[in-house]
Image (cartoon, helix red, strand yellow):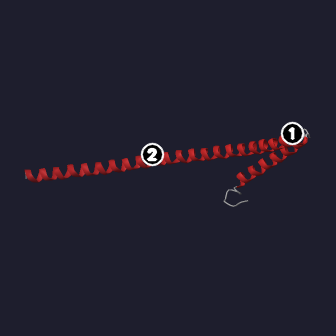
Amino acid sequence: MLGQNNLSTLIWCMRKYVMSSFKKEENLNSRIDNALAKKGNKNEVNNNNKTLVNTFSRVATELLAGLLVGAGIGWTLDKWLNTNPWFLILFFLLGGAAGILNLWRVVTGKGLKIGYF
């Protein structure tokens, strides 16, 4: 009788241990899933912020480059032909238009493929 009681006690303890380890595993798995979900969301937000910052910096660079190149060409032509400030004004405006065209291409997603022009 004592052997039977010990066996049932052993089985009861094993069941309790196994069930508690299953609960621990489920709890651990759920905690891991929650942590990965939170981390995934943070990475997604960070990637969106980086993409937005990259787009804004590209737009600013495109506009500034168009204006500077246009003004440089205009200034050079004015000095060469002694026609102050006509070419500077003309090419400054053309450079601004080129910068706005580049901005439009960035915003709409056109012109990002190879062989656009």
At a point 18% along the width and 53% down the height, the residue shown is 11
Q: Give the percent coordinates (x, y) of residue 98.
A: 79, 49
Which residue in the structure is indicated by mark 2? 35
Q: Amino acid at mark 2?
A: Ala
Select label 1 or label 2 by which is in front.
Answer: 1
> Which of these two is toward me, 96 or 32?
96
Most extreme residue toward the front is 80
Q: Earlier in the sequence, mark 1 or mark 2?
A: 2
Instruction: Report the residue marked by disc 1.
Output: 79
Callout 1 secondary element: helix
Q: Quadrant of residue 105?
A: bottom right
Q: Nearer the viewer, residue 53 or 84?
A: 84
Location of residue 51 in the rendering, given as x and y in whole percent from the top left corner: 62, 47
* Residues at marks 1 and 2, CA–CA distance in whole angstroms: 65 Å
Asked which quadrant contains residue 80, the reply is top right
Q: Answer with left or right where residue 61 lies relative to residue 16.
A: right
Q: Quadrant of the C terminus?
A: bottom right
In the structure shown, which secondary structural element does the residue marked by tag 2 occupy? helix
What residue is shown at x 33% (from left), y 50% (from top)?
25
Q: Which of 55/47 is in front?
A: 55
Q: Is residue 103 left or right of residue 84?
A: left
Residue drawn 88% across the image and 43% down it: 87
Q: On residue 105, which mark appears?
A: none
Residue type highlighted by circle 1: Lys
- x then y, percent, for residue 14: 21, 51
Category of crowding for the residue at label 2, using alpha-carbon neighbours closer than 10 angstroms: few (below 14), some (14–19), many (at least 20): few
**Horizontal side, residue 81 vs residue 56: left or right:** right
x then y, percent, for residue 109 = 69, 55
Mark 1: few/some/many CA within 10 Å (<14, 14-19, 20+): few
What residue is at 83 percent from the left and 47 percent from the top? 94
